[in-house]
Every structure is written in structure tokens, then in C-alpha cells.
Amino acid sequence: MLPYQNLLHINRLAATPIFLQLTNELVKLIQNGQLSAGAKLPSSRKFAQLLALNRNTITKAIEELEALGWVEILPKKGTFVVNTFPIVQPNDWSKRKLMANKESENQFEFYDFPALKIPKALSQNMGFDDGLPDVRLAPIDELARGYARNIRQLAFERDLSYKDGLGNLDLRKQLTKMLNETRGLNINPDNILITKGTVMAIHLAVAAAVKKGDKVLVGDTNYKTSDMIIRYVGGELIRLPLDDQGIQVDKIPAICEKQSIRAIYVTSHHHHPTTVTLSPERRMRLLKMANKYNFVILEDDYDYDFHFDNSPVLPLASGDKNGRVLYFGSFTKMIAPAFRVGYLVGPSRIIQVLPKLRRIMDRQGDTILEKTIADLLANGTIRRHLKKSWRHYKERRDFCCDLLKKEFGDLISFQKPAGGMAVWVKFDERIAIPQLSKKMKEKGLYLADGSTYNPAGVQLNTIRMGFASMNLEEIERCVKVLKSLI
């Protein structure tokens, strides 16, 4: 008899009922040939003893298998795998094979994506992240009530079907009002496409502007996801140096005189990862260069709302008179990363056709969540939340920067960011950030390993240290632990 207790894996903590888990596990044995056509299964009593399960659970699983056509129950004889399945060479279920768990050598060769990286999920709920909001400040109760109200209302109206690929119209109207009032844009709802966060917006914008072989200007340190997207569509990156006023746009004419440039990607507020703000003078020059040298500006404005020292500089999109800026942002930094609602703003002639591309990877967004966000914009909840969180994040920035200077002195160097949710910190060369990151993880705290933003062949020994997601006591604790490890 097969060692069922070793072959059948049941998770008693899983949400899936145990009888269904058992059903699925037995189906796998049949598919793999370990239970061959015509094979007899143990009695329900024997199964219950082997697996330490209730006999009723075994009976329900057998009945499910019969209903699905995998087994047949013969009165007074027992339960048998049906005889109509093809003969399958069974896997070796010896202990050695079970431990190795190797894939079959006769496997299909899928294409890989060597230029892309899987994003890491944060396993620690506290530490110096990449610059995330504090979800404890988010208007969760208002979101929950709004979501519940909208799903009930839309269900009552039988309005939960497929929707416009551009996104919820109410949200596009509310975003039009917000962006025109706060960012100096001059748009209407036809200029907006709602996306699943900023990454989708970048993907759609790049796909609309860049094809294989096109040259794209980016900072010499840059948001890695945008780099990957540009490379994935076949674009070639050309790096521009950075200083305390952002990308050095004065380097662009010399490049454009030698070769055709299709686009430039910029994070104007605030450059990712270094946090510096592109100066107003450089913004004006960049807009003129885009017209002169015929390229498009991909403007990522992921945390415009959190500028602390003075009024934020209006985005490039506010000064665009020729339809050369595609502008994108999201509610991730406003609320929380789990709420995947972003937006792409641009000339209506391209915005109106982008749903063609969007539909082959995501037919539409979360209609109910989009409607709920629209309601929170309309009733002022988002505005009040931003005002409250702005005060908290400014206080945390000041506290964190002062504490880092006090505790680490010359071991680190950084410029206090004018805005955003992270500090760009360079460590003394004697400090190995990868090892420091591992030690922080052992303490249950997050610290980047320093590899993400290194240019090719260069070790910057620099990391983004996010402060916004922690309160003052948590920031102090993390700094003390970090100092003790150094």
C-alpha cells in the first residue's frame, strides 16, 4: 500500500476545507500515476487511521472524487480509480525522491525574463523601508464603509459588469479637479486613465512612447522598475548625471545632436532614489528641449503631496503646451501600497487608445475601489488625511535626520530631503551594508542591502532610509539598534 501519510499533504490551518484538500491531493496522485487506473483505495476507516482525520471527512472526499469522475464506488467491493485513464509512469515515491522533489526532465521549456526582477515582499513590519506611508494614519474606516456601501449599491443596481477601460468616470472627474487645483494642470477627464498603481501607468506610458532600439534618457541612479520596463520593450538607456538640483539637463543637447532621443524619464518630486527636486529652471529648459529635439517626457510624480520646506514646484505637466508630457502618480503614498489605484495623464489622443493595451493584461481596474476613492475625494476625506499625514511625516523627517546626525556623525552623510518619505544616506566605506542588513533582519527590522540602486559596476554604499512609516519612538528604536550593530 502506498505511504499515504507521506504523499498526502494536509494543512489544517488553511482556509480550504480539509476534505477538498484531500480530494485535490488524491487527484494529484492519480495524475502522476502513483494511483494507477483500476487501483483500489483504502477503506474510509483505514484512511482515517492513516491520516488522523475524521472518517466523515474521508467519506466527503471520496464522494467528491466520485462526483468529479476520478473514482468509482462499487458496492461491497470498495473504491477504485476509474479504468479510463491513460497509463502514466509513476514517480518514485521513495524517501530520497520525496526529499529531492526534482522537476521532471521532460518539462516544457518556457521563456524566462532575465532582465526583470521579482519585487521582494517585506517580511518585517518595521524598519527603514524604501519610503512607504504609515498605514495606521490611513482613513481605513472611511474606505471600508465606502467600499461596503458602493458594492451594495452597485449590486442592487445590477451594475457589477465590465466597465470602461479608462477607469471609473467619477474618479476621473474628481482627479481632474484635484490635479487642476493642486498641480496647475489644465485637463479634463478624457486626459486621465486610471491604472493599478504607478507601475502600470509607467508600463503603459513607455509602451506608448518607446519601441525596440529607441534611446531613453534616465538619471545615473534611477527607479529600477522604470529601467526594467524600458529595457523590456527594447528601449536603450542613456544615463545622465545628477546633482543637488536633479538631472543635469545641460548634458542633453550634446547627446541629442549625435543621436535621436525618444524619451526622458524623470521623477521630478523627488528624484528616486536620491530625493532631490528638479529645479524650476531645469524644468523650463527641459520642456523647451523636448520640443526642440522631439522627445517625450515621462514624469513620475509619486509623492508630490509631501513637500515640507516650501510649496512644491509645479510639475512639468503644468507647463506642457505641446502634449509632450505623460504624467503619472498614485494613491499608494497617500494611503497604502495595498490600494492599487494610480493614474496616467496625457494628451487625449493617446489616453483614449491606451485601453487597447491595458485590456490584454488587465481588462479594467477595481470598479468599487475606484468609486470609493472618488467619494473620499469628493467629501474631503483624502484632503483631510493628506493634511494630517503631512504634519506627521514632516515631524518624522526632522526627528529622523537630527537623530541620524547625532548618533552616527561622520559614519554617514546625507542631505536633509525637502520632501518625500526617505533619506538618501551614504555610509562610511568601512561599513558593509549587506551584512548590516542581515543583522537588522535578525532583529526583526528592515534595512535595504544597498544593491538596488548601484549603477553597473559601481558600489555606492548608499541606501534609502524611509522614515514615514514609523512613529518617533519606532524611529528611535531602529536608530539605536542600527548603531549597536555598527
Image: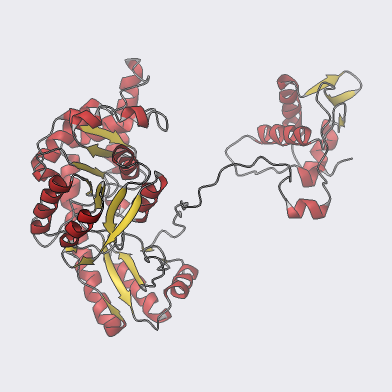
The quadrant of the image that shows the N terminus is: top right
Which of the pair 161/413 is nearer the observer?
Answer: 413
Image coordinates of residue 65 in percent, x first then y, are 74, 25
Residue at the image point whose x is 74% and y is 39% from the top: 53
Image coordinates of residue 73 in percent, x first then y, are 83, 20
What scheme was used to colour the molecule? secondary structure
Residue at the image point whose x is 28% and y is 34% from the top: 194
Residue 253 is drawn in which quadrant?
A: bottom left
Counting the numbered discs, the total is 0
Which of the pair 311/274 is nearer the observer?
Answer: 274
Q: In the rendered view, would you say 340 is above or below 64?
A: below
Image coordinates of residue 155 in percent, x first then y, are 36, 19
Q: In the rendered view, would you say 432 is above or below 312?
A: below
Which of the pair 48/465 is nearer the observer?
Answer: 465
Q: Is residue 334 visible?
A: no
Q: Is residue 165 visible?
A: yes
Image coordinates of residue 381 in percent, x first then y, are 19, 40
The quadrant of the image that shows the C terminus is: bottom left
Check the image and name the residue furthest to the front.
258
Which of the pair 87/73 is nearer the observer?
Answer: 87
Check the image and name the residue furthest to the right.
77
Residue 354 is drawn in which quadrant?
A: top left
Residue at the image point whose x is 8% and y is 43% from the top: 184
Left or right of 16 in this view: 192: left
Q: In the rendered view, would you say 130 is above or below 74?
A: below
Left or right of 61 in this view: 351: left
Residue at the image point whose x is 33% and y is 54% from the top: 237
